[in-house]
Image: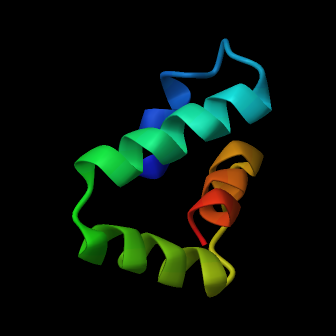
Amino acid sequence: MAHEISRQFASEPPEQAAQTIAAHLRRFWAPSMIVAFLTEAGAGADLDPVVSRVAELLR
């Protein structure tokens, strides 16, 4: 799902997109969803660079 959200911000500079997406996830995702996302990201999931940065921002 984070990849789908990141596609909506593809026209923004990568760091700005990552900051915006991280803020969105903090606001609208349940804590359990963020934990699941971070678990998947930490397990070596194949992430888009912007989505990888989002994971870093959420840690």
For residue 44, above or below residue 28: below
Q: Nearer the viewer, residue 29 or 36?
A: 29
For residue 14, above or below residue 23: above
Identify the coloring.
rainbow
| Left or right position of 55 against 36 | right
User: How many numbered circles does the render carry?
Assistant: 0
Q: Is residue 4 visible?
A: no
Residue 21: percent from the left, percent from the top? 51, 39
Q: Nearer the viewer, residue 23 or 49?
A: 23
Residue 13: percent from the left, percent from the top? 77, 20
- Name the residue: 65% across, 58% down: 57
**Residue 10 occupies which quadrant of the picture?**
top right
Residue 36: percent from the left, percent from the top? 38, 78
- Name the residue: 64% across, 39% down: 18
Which quadrant does the C terminus fall into?
bottom right
Q: Residue furthest top?
A: 11
Residue 28: percent from the left, percent from the top? 25, 47
| Left or right position of 35 against 57 | left
Q: Is residue 36 visible?
A: yes
**Residue 14 occupies which quadrant of the picture?**
top right
**Residue 15 occupies which quadrant of the picture?**
top right
